[in-house]
Image (cartoon, rainbow, N blue to C red):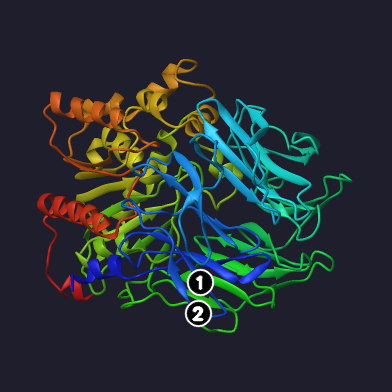
Amino acid sequence: MGERWQDRFRASRISLPSWAREAPDHSMFRGNASGTWEIYTWDRATGEQRQVTKRHHGTTSGTLDPTGTWVWWFGDTDGDEFGTWRRQPFQGGPDTAAVPGLPPSYIGGLALGVSGLALVGRSTDDGFSVHLSRPGTQPRTVYAHRQEGWIADLSHDESLFVIGHSEHGDSRHMAVRVLRLLPDGTAATVADLWDGPGRDLTPVGFAPGGHRVLVLHERHGRVEPLIWDPLTGTEQEIRIDLPGELSAGWTPDGRSLLISQDHRARSRVHRHDPATGATTPLDIPDGLVAAAAARPDGTVEYSWSSSEHPPVVRDTTGATLLAPPGPVAPPSVPVRDVDVPGPGGDIHALVSVPAGAAEPLPTVFMVHGGPQAQDVDAFSAAVSAWVDHGFAVVRVNYRGSSGYGAAWRDAIEGRVGLTELEDIKAVRDWAVASGLADAGRMILEGGSWGGYLTLLGLGVYPEDWSLGIAAMPLADYAASYADQMESLRAFDRSMFGGSPDDVPDLYRRSSPITYVENVTAPVLILAGENDPRCPIRQIDNYIARLTELGKSHEVYRFDAGHGSFVVEELIRHMSAELDFAQRFTAPRREGPSPRTA
């Protein structure tokens, strides 16, 4: 038995099970009971569960074909996200190449049909493409473009497919296209939907049994759903008087939508009838619904947690749907909300503190990745570990975060990194002024984009931070752009208005390595050797500069990609961070023992 914080990492967890459209008793989920996140099947009729994949670095991308005959999963190499789809019979058997003859790539979506037809999306340095595969035939290219995209769905009659694409040059604000599969194995455009520059459209999927497409749009400054018929051109915007952003999915009968309301770091789920406009909330506690789906019998299954309570998978009857084996994760502390005035408007932040601890406290600013993501009221083993060790934790939904409208998300364009740091600094100054945080024991910590902002913040605002911990960071922007996957290069071009060759001054201004000479705080950097998103060479460039300048720093390297799916490796990461922080900040220990709080 490990320490309390380690028990949270080791507690088994599962994702919300999905199921085969034509065989709803055949389900699939992701779980970490083996110590690594892998793909599992679940036969609801017999109760049998079976582990499908067993790989050193884990497996998280998978799906069932509509008949429930096959489990498809994506096999990369050492966590580098570059690979091919493989498949295995639902009842067990050998793995085989799902689409023989299709070279490796990054994932660009996958759509499967009842007949065995498969449409595979591929992302490579050459851009995005879609490939048609039928049993016994070689795959054929049915769509290709230099700009990025992804395939969202195949209609149930297998005549149409829908993609999101960025042929207009902006991968952060996509357009939607429906194409028809022709008898000769090619495809022809049926209809296009684009709302113009700066407005994203996200295809969700075809209505069950039909050709209408559910799409998420931003026409009114936030994410909302609409139903589009590409054959007639008609559109129905789903206008619901609820705050926040609204995403949606079809129910199995195609008559209703499940609406997910994302508001102030929490979510609510509603059932909506497009014919009548009636919207009915589901009885789910406050917190975060990570995923929800309607079953053919009308019940809704969902995965839920809060900052205080560990994840559970339930349905709307109140029953626990599927419980992972072993002990449940120990609970943690609830989160409180703060709103801090900032240069771009009020900033929403989440604060977690040890129970009964006396302020001011050593404080960790945990910066989320993305940037198009957000911190939420959901269970986090990492947040809880810091709290258990006597630290306050502050998480900031800075400009660039999703969940607060399109303008807030896109406010970082042209001034990447620096805009987010202004918001983090405003909340940092509030934390000190309010008496929550000890100004002499302030840690800036984050992973991925959060790691990037950590390194950038240590150089731009060196006087604000006592310590920095950056996991899988973007450290040298120009070098990162050269080495990373093409989909992220396209993302960068859309934020900066071009490549490093086009606008070198903008990239230089936003690159942590530009400010490395200003860094005064000790720095811990955690880096994956096979990371395709924040490649190792650009991290080594930054580390070399720290060494040349004699800056205090430590490095933790691990054999994986952009993070790890191995539980014990995650514990080692957390241990390295806690050890580093405790050596340099010496948190006070008066009051209740932090490990029993």
* Amino acid type, callout 1: Trp
Q: Nearer the viewer, residue 17 or 354?
A: 17
Residue shown at the point (31%, 78%) measured from the top left: 327
Q: What x and y, as percent, mark residue 290?
A: 51, 63
Q: Is residue 139 left or right of residue 160?
A: left
The residue shown at (87%, 48%) is: 234
- What amino acid type is highlighted by mark number 2? Gly
Identify the element where label 1 is drawn. strand
Question: Could you say which disc has been placed on residue 47 in the image?
Answer: 2
- 276 relative to 546 in the view: left or right: right
Vertical order, 450 against 392 (above or below)? above
Structural crowding at the residue carrying mark 2, measured as other residues with C-alpha within 10 Å and reported as few (<14), some (14–19) or many (≥20): few
User: Mark 1 and mark 2 in contact (Cβ < 8 Å)?
Assistant: yes
Labels 2 and 1: the sequence-earlier one: 1
Q: Nearer the viewer, residue 277 or 243?
A: 277
Which corner quadrant holds the C terminus?
A: bottom left
**Is 482 placed above or below 155 here?**
above
Q: Regarding mark 2 in the picture, which secondary structure is present there?
A: loop
Q: Quadrant of the N terminus?
A: bottom left
Distance from label 2 to label 1 (Cα)? Answer: 7 Å
Residue at 24% across, 59% down: 568
Residue at the outermost front position? 136
Residue 174 visible, this angle? no
Q: Quadrant of residue 533?
A: top left
Residue 576 screen position, x and y as percent:
18, 52
Residue 414 shown left or right of residue 424 in the figure: right
According to the picture, the residue beneath numbered tag 1 turns out to be 42
Q: Position of residue 324 (x, y in %)?
A: 40, 74
